Every structure is written in C-alpha cells, then in structure tokens.
Amino acid sequence: MTEITILIADDHPIFRKGLRQIIESGSGMNVVAEADDGEACYEKARELKPDVIILDVNMPKMDGFEVARKLHDSNLSVEVVFLTMYKDEEMFNEALDLGARGYVLKSSALTDIVDCVRAVSSGQHYISPTLSDFLLNRRNRAASFVRSKPSIGDLTPTELRILRLIAESKTSKEIAAELFISYRTVENHRANICQKLDLHGSNALVKFAIEHKSAL
C-alpha cells in the first residue's frame, strides 16, 4: 500500500497533536508536517507536496479558503479537507466550490478524520454525516437549476468551464490565459452562453454565474 502523506494546518497546537495521533494510528498514513497559520501551510505545501492537506477554515494570516485558492492557482496536485467548528451551509458550499473533497466538523474530527483522509486520497468525497442535509440541499439546488434552465444542457464543456471561471470573477483576458485560447475566442463563447441562457445586458452573465456558482 502506498503511504498517504498529510499536512495538518490548524492554529490550535493541542488539537493538532490529537489529530496527528489519530491519523498516525491508522496504517499507511504519515503526517509530514504541521502549520499554525495559512501562510506557513501554503509554503510547506509547495515544499513537501503532500497527498492531503487538512485545513482549518479559520487561521491567522490566510484562512483556509485563501490557502485553497492559492493551491489551486499554483496547480499543486493535492486533495483538501476542510475542518471547521461551525455547521454553516454557506461555508460548506464555498468549500465544495473550491474543489474540496473532504469537509469535517471539528466536533467529530477525531472519529471521522481517518476515514476522510482515506476517502479523499482515493478520489472520493467525505462529508461529516451530520452535514448530510447540506449536501442534499446542494444536490437539490443543482437539479432544480438544470430543470429551470433546460438550455444549460446545450452548453459545451468549454462553455461550462468558462461559466465557472466567470463565477470566480475572472476576466476574459484571464480566462484566455488559463485555457490557452485567444481573447476573441473567450468573447465568442461568452456571447454564445448568453444566447443559450437568454441573458441580456452587460453584467447579466457575470451576475448569473455568481448567483449560480454552487450549482455549476
């Protein structure tokens, strides 16, 4: 079995110690480093390139969401598990929008974390069982969105990807650079998306993308 390497980022040393002990009691898992703030976590992630990063949402210098965005922008191949004290649906959706495969409440972390790490390292999702309603709501919203906008199914994979990037407030120039296509091509795609979704007005597409970000 290949060893799973893990970085823990949390500003509470006692909690980190307990989490590390639990993780390393599981076979095939190795905590390669710890960090007590977001900046240190990002630097250690770049240096060590662990398989999984366990990120506290609330940390000094950079919060967990900021760290996840920087990891994504740096194209680091790492799975992210968010830890939080709060049962907050908006926070939950933001974490999943950022591509996190794991989302665990601190109150259940000591019992959930080993299964979570194993799941996300193999490409699966793991959500604390007490948050199952949030996941169901998210899926229902996505299904409702597709039903209410039948033309969404007519968007090409590239158009869907551009719509997701627009939801991240990326400009056409930034999207062109990220997708290695021309600015004019991005603008053509934006026009096609507006036509298919019956959107009108200079800001309609941006507003639509942001409002439906969690469903894209």
Image (tube, rainbow, N blue to C red):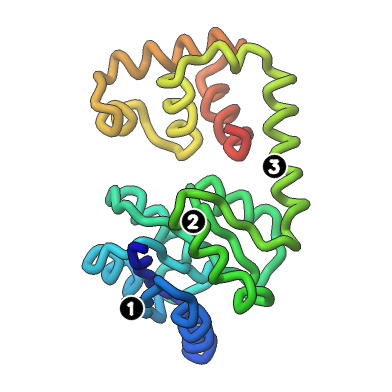
Give the structural element (helix, strand or loop) at label 3: helix
- Badge 1 crowding class, 10 Å Cα cut-off, few under 14, some 14 to 19, many 20 or more, is some
For mark 2, what is the residue?
120
Q: Quadrant of the N terminus?
A: bottom left
Q: Is residue 105 above or below residue 161?
A: below
Residue at image location 59% in from the left, 56% down from the top: 126
Q: Which mark is residue 138?
A: 3
Give the x, y percent position of residue 85: 65, 73
For mark 1, what is the residue?
33
Q: Earlier in the sequence, mark 1 or mark 2?
A: 1
Q: Is residue 63 above or below residue 92?
A: below
**Nearer the observer, 48 or 71:** 48
- Identify residue type, mark 1: Ala
**Nearer the observer, 32 or 87:** 32
Residue at image location 37% in from the left, 16% down from the top: 187
- Identify residue type, mark 3: Arg
Q: Quadrant of the C terminus?
A: top right
- Identify residue type, mark 2: Val
Residue at image location 36% in from the left, 50% down from the top: 72
Q: Is residue 200 above or below residue 105?
A: above
Give the x, y percent position of residue 71: 34, 55
Give the x, y percent position of residue 117: 49, 64
Task: Please state which of the two labelled residues, at mark 2 or mark 3, is closer to the viewer.
Answer: 2
Task: Please state which of the two labelled residues, at mark 1 or mark 3, is closer to the viewer.
Answer: 1
- Badge 3 crowding class, 10 Å Cα cut-off, few under 14, some 14 to 19, many 20 or more, is some
Task: Please state which of the two labelled residues, at mark 1 or mark 2, is closer to the viewer.
Answer: 2
Give the structural element (helix, strand or loop) at label 2: helix
Residue 154 is at least partly visible in this image: yes
Q: Earlier in the sequence, mark 1 or mark 3?
A: 1
Judge left or right: residue 216 versus residue 65. Answer: right
